[in-house]
Image (cartoon, helix red, strand yellow):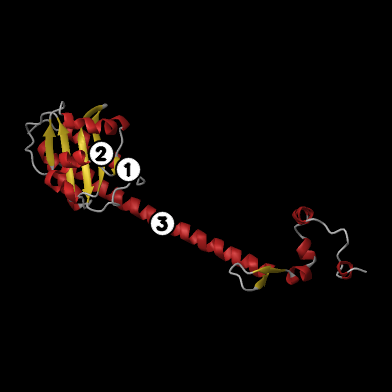
Amino acid sequence: MTTREARGIAATEMDEESIATFLQHNPDFFERHQAVLLRLRLPHARGGSTISLVERQIEVMREKHAALEGKLAELVAVARANDAIADKLHRFTRRLLQSGSRADAVGRIEASLREDFDAFHSVLLLMGEYPDLTPQRFVRTVAREDAELKSFDSLFGAGKPRCGQARDSQRQLLFGPDSGQIGSVALVPLTEKGTPLGVLALGSPDRDRFHPGMSTEFLARMADLIADALTMRRGA
């Protein structure tokens, strides 16, 4: 008698695939042979010892539970962040609704960006003539034929906000003397029925504050509100 036969293992031992197939078709095998289950030993996931199959299953379940808890915590954090932004956008909308003129609306936009969104480096660059608006640090106007606006053609072509790095010429046009302090930007195109009105630029000294992977949904909604305020407020 061979050693294998002495241990109760047939000389024509089943291959792994056959064993796996057998167990899949007989899920109650270990219930009927609990002694076999208890004798099975597996390498510990962290090495150095062996553990029973039951202990290994418990360990796997704990790891899955920890992963699910981490994912849930991540989703909750994202939901809370979105709620906070939605609340800020709500306040932004109410400010605009209370404005009495375009100049008043622009002032409220600047105040909300600074007070609600901590956007201390923000610029509203408008194309065309706005005699009712006084040029200042926050709002500036340029002629539509200004050659420097060509660098924003792709932004208006895409029709959606873009975050990340800006060209030196763009930073200089938008932020002027403060351009050297700007590490990252969010460029938000403002349009009315497809016609470019200007650009809202938000800048930050932090190079990672505005990055290409961030969501721009709220910026797009803000752009619609600003465009409406600029086109509906024709008075002084």
Q: Is disc 2 surrounded by few (<14), some (14 to 19) or many (20+) residues within 10 Å?
A: many
Mark pair 3, 1: CA separation: 19 Å
Q: Secondary structure at mark 1?
A: loop
Residue 10, x across and y down, in percent: 88, 62
Which label's residue is closer to the chain start, 3 or 2?
3
Q: Amino acid at mark 3?
A: Val
Which label's residue is closer to the chain start, 3 or 1?
3
Circles 1, 2 touching at the beta carbon (< 8 Å): yes
Q: Is residue 149 above or below residue 61?
A: above
Q: Secondary structure at mark 3?
A: helix
In the image, 234 versus 127, the foreground residue is 127
Tag nearer the camera, 3 or 1: 1
Residue at (27%, 27%) from the top-left corner? Answer: 194
Residue 226, x across and y down, in percent: 21, 37
Judging by the rendered image, the residue that carries numbered circle 2 is 188
Quadrant where the C terminus is found in the figure:
top left
In the image, 26 versus 200, the foreground residue is 200
Judging by the rendered image, the residue that carries numbered circle 3 is 76
Tag nearer the camera, 3 or 2: 2
In the image, 77 versus 101, the foreground residue is 77
Judging by the rendered image, the residue that carries numbered circle 1 is 216
Q: Amino acid at mark 2?
A: Val
